Image (spheres, helix red, strand yellow):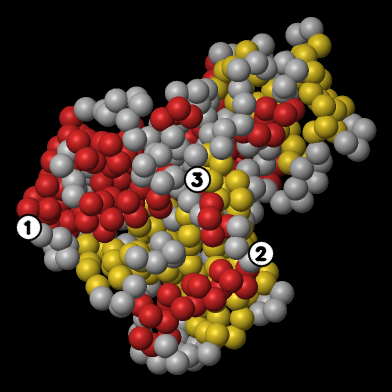
Amino acid sequence: MNRPIILGGGVAGIAAAMELADAGCKPILIESRPYLGGRVRSFVHRETNEEIDNGRHLLMGCYHTTLNLLDRLGTGHHISLQPALRVEFRDSDGSLDILSAPSWLPSPLNVLVGMMGLRRLSLRERLGLIRVGLQAKREMPDKAETVTEYLLRLGQSSRVQERLWNPLVIATLNTKPEEASARLFVEVLRLAFLSSGDDSKLAFSHVGLSQLFSPAREYIASRGGDVLLGCFASHVSRNGEEWHVELRDGRTFDTPTLLTALPWGEFSTLFNKNIQGIFPPRHNPIISLYLWFDSVGGELPDFSAMLGTSVEWMFNRRKIVGDREGESPALIECVISAADDICRMENSRIIAVVEEELRRAFPSLRSTPLLTAQVIKEKRATFAATPSVETIRPRPGYYSDGLFIAGDWTATGLPGTIEGAVRSGVAAARSLQRGK
């Protein structure tokens, strides 16, 4: 059989399979779960019968490869970009600061002007932001440098770090600034905020994440490919010029070209006897919370970056998704990244902490009953984006002996994001077509 086999039906696997299907390669995509998308999925909350996501995956205008893939799937219309970059920073006491980038200015000048409007920073601190932008555009940090070391070297005060840079680092790298790779941080700055056009704008899905990628199965099948769901690959071996794949249900496949889009740990485990030098790094958790509040008096913003709280982001899901906007109950989604300590708490305690923080920060919630809540702990959400990990990430594409690799953990130049996963899948598929 000359058809390529893809292991793993997450976003990277979907992207690879679509690319190969478009090229007429008729791939076979094997996924152990009964659905595609991996961690990027939604499900129905039993108590409220509402569709919620497994975790907030924030998109941006700079996610060109992802947005192109969604357009090919016919789901791109479910994504909307902000008219202009606008982020509300809300302190634990409810006070506000707003980064508002003028839509009439070209990027990245509009982002710079927006940063100049952060009134909780001194004029000197705001002017110091320019130094970071210029340095990031001019050269990359040292390979071993952390974000904290990089920002201190560029004269960024602790207040600037706490109010601007640290929330950005944690949100994009899911790693604490004192541990995070400065190089990856600069890559994010270049991609999102120092580029052009709509790149800096945030993008929001108006449907559950599963709906964005659900047409992938039909897309692949309509081009001669096959998608096998609920099929666990239990053993992989190299026999002569071919890879031999055994499924738990007894089926076997042989192919000269095997593309793995498995998570780092699963890849390492499955190929341990064949591949040396790859091992699972430390992963950092992300906690998502959904809180249903009774009728809320007053207006809640679409979303807020939270300062001085355990919660990093608050999203008003009714406004973002657009269903039942203004109706009761209000549905608030909160995200806690790099959540090692909080992840060890009982769910009831996490809910109590977050509820108290939201009531302090948003006056309209202070006397509003909490009806129910859901905690989602993604304990291995992304790899820890440290300098040491960055040096061992293998490139997506050809690895050895007809084996090709993809995944957000490969060296995409980005942290563990949807865009990184999609890019890796496309790169691996194109490498497979070239045979190297």
- According to the image, label 1 marks what residue? 123
Vertical arrangement, residue 239 with respect to residue 97, above or below: above
Q: Quadrant of residue 47?
A: bottom right
Q: Give the label on residue 43, or none.
A: 2
Left or right: residue 404 compared with residue 234: left
**Within-10-Å neighbours for mark 2: few <14, some 14–19, many 20+:** some
Q: Residue at x 36, y 44 (%)?
A: 177
Vertical arrangement, residue 38 with respect to residue 325, above or below: above
Q: Amino acid at mark 3?
A: Ile
Kindly report which numbered mark, 2 or 1, lies closer to the viewer in this rendering: 1
Could you tell me which quadrant the N terminus lies in? top right
Kindly report which numbered mark, 3 or 1, lies closer to the viewer in this rendering: 1
Kindly report the distance in space between the C-alpha atoms of the residues bearing marks 2 and 1: 46 Å
Q: Residue at x 44, y 65 (%)?
A: 311
Residue 188 rendering spot, x and y as whole percentages: 33, 41
Q: Nearer the viewer, residue 287 or 226?
A: 287
Q: Quadrant of residue 347?
A: bottom right
Determine the residue located farthest toward the top in the rendered image.
240
Q: Tell me which label, 2 or 3, sits earlier in the chain.
A: 2
